[in-house]
Amino acid sequence: ETGVTQTPRHLVMGMTNKKSLKCEQHLGHNAMYWYKQSAKKPLELMFVYNFKEQTENNSVPSRFSPECPNSSHLFLHLHTLQPEDSALYLCASSQPGGRGDTGELFFGEGSRLTVL
Amino acid sequence: SQQGEEDPQALSIQEGENATMNCSYKTSINNLQWYRQNSGRGLVHLILIRSNEREKHSGRLRVTLDTSKKSSSLLITASRAADTASYFCATVPNSGYALNFGKGTSLLVTP
């Protein structure tokens, strides 16, 4: 148990569906992250939030829409996805550091997404 | 890219042997971190080494950092079957907030 909980653990959706992934952390951190992990590829950073403000958007398509209502919760809203978006989506949190000095990330177990 | 690049991509050893994984990166860093991932699970932080440190130990793990060569190594001594996992190094670009990961080294430890 890392203190970061992701739901659902598995999700199957059609290309026209709208769904959301949820992440909750109980560690008192103020930085939260979404990463995408596809087979045979490095982890891809998607979004970074520091104190509820988005500080990085790594050129993610608009069919992925993040939401951070408070420092403990992070959502990833999904709509009109493509089959190539099938992947493991990982949420992480950390204490915020200065630029270039991020500390240890605590990851959730991930949400395995399959787009049909 | 600031991503770390791990080498080798895959490593297969027997229990009791040592496993060494290497990581290279491209630009200046403040710290370098190593993570472990069991199949289909989240990543778990193993160790963080700062740019002014050359070596760090944690249990059976030993990490070295050579900033002049922009490289790091992770040594797992006396490996066990339970060490089977993927291992990733991660760095943060000086202009950014988030860790960039490499593709990882897949380690298989056979009994």
Image (spheres, grey):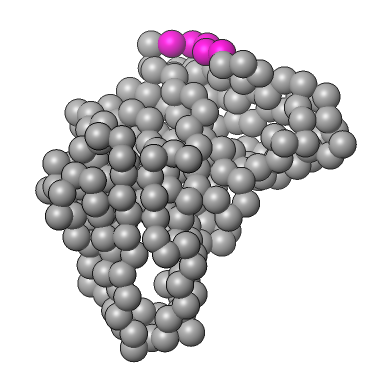
Q: Is residue A47 above or below residue B92?
A: below
Q: Quadrant of the C terminus of chain B?
A: top right
**Residue B100 visible in the current orientation:** no
Q: Magenta residues, as a range? A: B53-57
Q: Is residue A21 above or below residue A104?
A: below
Q: Position of residue A45 (x, y in %)?
A: 35, 52
| Corner quadrant of residue A40 | bottom right
Q: Position of residue B72 (x, y in %)?
A: 53, 24
Q: Assess whether residue B54 is covered by the magenta stretch.
A: yes
Q: Position of residue A52 (x, y in %)?
A: 14, 47
Q: Is residue B49 above or below residue B110?
A: above
Q: Assess whether residue B15 is covered by the magenta stretch.
A: no
Q: Is residue A80 above or below residue A59?
A: below
Judge by depth and name the residue closer to the eye, B64 or A114.
Answer: A114
* In this picture, residue B54 sits left or right of residue A26: right
Q: Position of residue A100 (x, y in %)?
A: 26, 30
Taken as a whole, is the magenta stretch helix, strand or loop?
Answer: strand
* In this picture, residue B38 sits left or right of residue A28: right
